[in-house]
Image (cartoon, grey):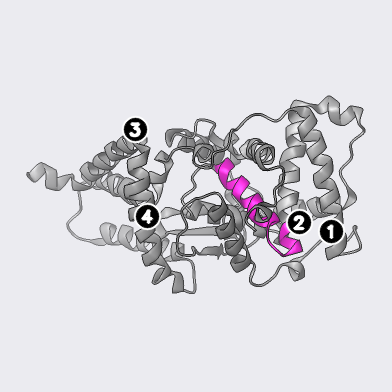
Amino acid sequence: MKLTKKYIGLLAGIFTIILFQFFKAFPAVLESVYTNGVYRLIRFIYYYTFAYFPFPLLYVFIGGLITYALYLLMRKKKAKIIPLVLNFLGWIIVVFYWSWGFNYARTSFADRSALTVSEPDEHFLYKELLEVDTILINLRKSILENDTIPLSEIHLPNDYQEIINHSQVDLLTFLNQPIYKQPRIRSLKPKGSLLRIKTAGVYFPFVFEGHIDDGLHPIEKSYVLAHEMAHAYAFTDEGVCNFIGFMTCVNTDNEFIQYAGWLEYQGYLYRALRRNFPELLKDNNYELPMVVKTDLKDIRKRLDLYPSIAPQLRDLFYNNYLKVQGVHAGMKSYAQITKLAYSFKQKYGDYDFKQFTK
């Protein structure tokens, strides 16, 4: 009994890991008990409490950790280091999984959405790239006539988070996915806080909030926010969140946000062709449209203000983290957006899902 009390945090962490494995074996139980039960309650409580805070709760979390560390260092009776560390790690595991992480044990998004996922061939990818280029050129011309001047903050609507949430709720309703009370995605300062660790945004389960770097280019802010919002709606796979972010943006009524979504998707298409079928681009003398070149150059210029610190270490850590959670593709899962987009288009014929709900 004394030993149990001494290592209560560690034991709670072990129990949570065992429960996670149980949920992976019985995802229907997880969906009922956690995703549509406990997690729904968490999002409900957050919406009526912490969502009203005028600043990111991440600041409070970091401040609390620092305060607790100082307390341990300054108190006269020093805690034994091994039980302290093991219990701390145990409680981290408990809070992570109970606040969001159990969602990693859900069945695949494709199964839940009745999508038959398959690999797009080079013909689809190239045809899709050309179609998206045309959409981008037309949208860009509607926003700003001069294609040599980059888009800026003045084009990003002040209420873009509300616009994106409304569109994402419509999308998830169409896909028959759980809908919760509106999450908050915070803009994290100082600028470069995330970009310097090679991250544009992050969902932090310990505070129930998503975050985007305040230093992001305005074109990127819309898409990254939509991606992080998808995490708050209980999606864990990065490729799925990329797809949901893309679909969310292109189905809004705001042309700037639409442009942001199409531009991100265009990048994945272009990189997939350049990586797997470079001869196709070469044989067709493909060249990026001027509008894309202009905005990508400006985005790169903004990112260069915040050079990454130890990017290889970050990639190694996050790749292994994803694999431990059951995302076998690791960081390569981000590129699954092209597979999901292809599968959606094969099934519905178009990305405008709203036409099917009328």
Q: Within 10 angstroms of label 1, few (less than 14), some, or many (20 or more) residues?
A: many
Is residue 27 shown left or right of residue 277? left
* Label whose residue precedes the other's in the sequence (4 or 2): 4
Above or below residue 7? Residue 123 is above
**154 on left or right of 230:** right
Taking the image as drawn, is residue 110 in sight?
Answer: yes
Mark 1 or 3, nearer chain start: 3
Quadrant occupied by the N terminus: top left
Q: Which residues are magenta?
A: 238-259
Kind of residue at disc 3:
Ala
Residue 335 lies in the magenta-colored region? no
Residue for point 38% across, 45% down? 31
**What residue is rendered at 82% in x and 52% in y?**
136
**Residue denoted by label 1:** 140
Foreground residue among 26 and 63:
26
Disc number for residue 259: 2
Q: Amino acid at mark 1?
A: Arg
